[in-house]
């Protein structure tokens, strides 16, 4: 089944133009418990870590070149964030040149596998014993 929607070119270009400014803010302003960055609602209400808890701190560490600390905050984001940024700028480059936008149509088994891995990561990072407690966001 083919999707009946498309991301507008202007939106991709706008995000590609604004994201360096957002990255600059994230580079200079460290996310802390007392900063203005939003907190994870699931973690605030239940104490559990969602699959993306620590992603903002991970982005800050990645932008500052501290890959070990970034992995300690969120190992999944260390992999997904650079891939998402590459796709965004590839799409923006194509949109700016008037070429067709890249499509992302993975097979259903690939989406299912990603969701299974995402939920497995979510589950194991909340286990309170070694070595799984190392997947919970923590400072090195």
Image (cartoon, grey):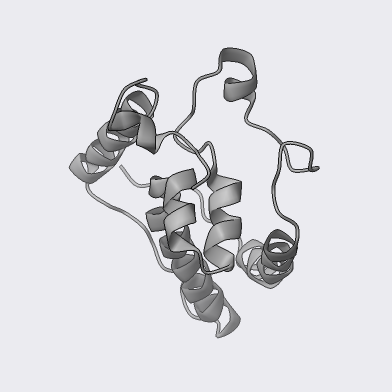
Please, is residue 94 above or below residue 16 in the view? below
Q: Is residue 61 left or right of residue 125?
A: right
Query: Which quadrant of the structure image shows residue 96?
Result: bottom right
Residue at image point 71% right, 54% down? 30
Q: Nearer the viewer, residue 88 or 7?
A: 88
Instruction: List x then y, in percent, for residue 31.
Output: 69, 48
Q: Is residue 51 left or right of residue 2?
A: right
Residue lying furthest bottom:
97
Instruction: List x then y, in percent, for residue 85.
Output: 50, 65
Q: How many marks?
A: 0
Q: Is residue 122 left or right of residue 81?
A: left
| Residue 3 visible in the snapshot | no
Residue lying furthest left:
109
Residue lying furthest front:
140
Instruction: List x then y, in percent, for residue 55.
Output: 54, 46
Query: Which quadrant of the structure image shows residue 74?
Result: top left
Instruction: List x then y, in percent, for residue 5.
Output: 51, 49
Quadrant location, the N terminus: top left
Residue at image point 55% right, 85% down? 97
Please, is residue 125 above or below residue 69 in the view? above
Residue at image point 71% right, 68% down? 24
| Residue 61 visible in the snapshot | yes
Please, is residue 15 above or below residue 37 in the view? below
Q: Nearer the viewer, residue 107 or 83?
A: 83
């Amino acid at each position: 089944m083919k999707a009946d929607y498309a991301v507008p070119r202007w939106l991709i270009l706008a995000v590609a133009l604004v994201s360096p400014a957002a990255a600059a803010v994230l580079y200079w302003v460290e996310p802390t418990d007392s900063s203005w960055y939003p907190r994870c609602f699931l973690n605030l209400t239940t104490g559990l870590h969602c699959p993306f808890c620590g992603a903002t701190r991970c982005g800050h560490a990645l932008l500052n070149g501290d890959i070990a600390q970034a992995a300690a905050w969120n190992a999944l984001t260390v992999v997904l964030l650079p891939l998402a940024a590459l796709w965004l700028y590839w799409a923006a480059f194509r949109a700016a040149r008037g070429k067709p936008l890249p499509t992302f149509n993975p097979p259903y088994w690939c989406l299912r596998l990603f969701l299974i891995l995402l939920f497995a990561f979510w589950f194991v990072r909340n286990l309170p014993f070694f070595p799984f407690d190392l997947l919970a966001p923590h400072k090195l």
